[in-house]
Image (tube, rainbow, N blue to C red):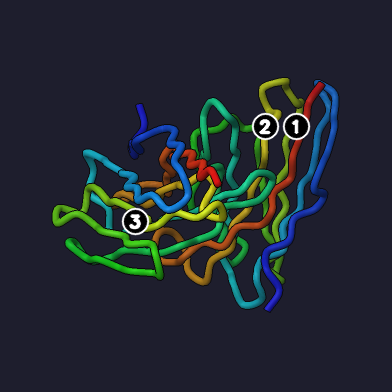
Amino acid sequence: TQLLEQSPQFLSIQEGENLTVYCNSSSVFSSLQWYRQEPGEGPVLLVTVVTGGEVKKLKRLTFQFGDARKDSSLHITAAQTGDTGLYLCAGSPYGQNFVFGPGTRLSVLP
Amino acid sequence: KAGVTQTPRYLIKTRGQQVTLSCSPISGHRSVSWYQQTPGQGLQFLFEYFSETQRNKGNFPGRFSGRQFSNSRSEMNVSTLELGDSALYLCASSLFSGAEGEQYFGPGTRLTVT
């Protein structure tokens, strides 16, 4: 069983549409990180959320950390083809090793 | 500032052989973590080194080992290769150990075992 679950697993949308992907766990995390990975490359860190209830905005991307520090969401406004990639959430439950979710594979079509 | 570099980028080995992968972290970063990424299992944590000491270890067999040098460069070794070891091996560097530091990944080494 995965410590971090992500949904949806796959998402295909048209350019200009909005979308939200989710990262959930039954464990409490001190912080959660979001990464985007493109084929043949390593994941690139997008953001770290630390405080329960925190909302961070990076241009068209909005990240939220749940009040209970067990879940997070990533919302993309007006998706562009350059947003295509594998979106991964990751974190370290208190006292445990760093873990990654299975990812959401996003495809933005022109 | 140069990013994380990994060598080689691609590697083909046969079953039973051993392999050594190298990772040079971002200058000033003292933590290096290694991950295995496969389509079926996703990204799985192998181990973390900080200041030449292994700090954490994932659930992998003893065939997987690593070390870190005084300049923070790290190597990962896999002995007696199996077909299931075919994967993208990623290293990540961080200023701090564990969950305290944000991780910056290298491009990975694609290992194929035949």
Residue under label 1, please give it.
Answer: B79
At x 58% / y 69%, what residue is drawn?
A: B30
- x then y, percent, for residue B41: 51, 29
Label 3: state its secondary structure: strand
Between residue A109 and residue B67, name the one nearer to us: A109
In this rendering, the answer to whether B88 lies above or below B112 is below
In this rendering, the answer to whether B99 lies above or below B13 is below
Does residue B24 show up?
yes
Label 1: state its secondary structure: loop
Amino acid type, mark 3: Leu
Q: Are marks 2 and 1 in contact (CB under 8 Å)?
A: yes
Q: CA distance from mark 3 to mark 1?
A: 33 Å
Q: Is residue B50 left or right of residue A5?
A: right
- x then y, percent, for residue B45: 51, 43
Residue under label 3, please give it.
Answer: A32
Amino acid type, mark 1: Ser
Residue B72 occupies quadrant: bottom right
Amino acid type, mark 2: Arg
Label 2: state its secondary structure: loop
Q: CA distance from mark 2 to mark 1?
A: 5 Å
Badges 3 and 1, same chain = no
Badges 2 and 1, same chain = yes
Q: CA distance from mark 2 to mark 3?
A: 30 Å
Quadrant the N terminus of chain A occupies: top left
Tell us which disc is closer to us: 2 or 3. 3
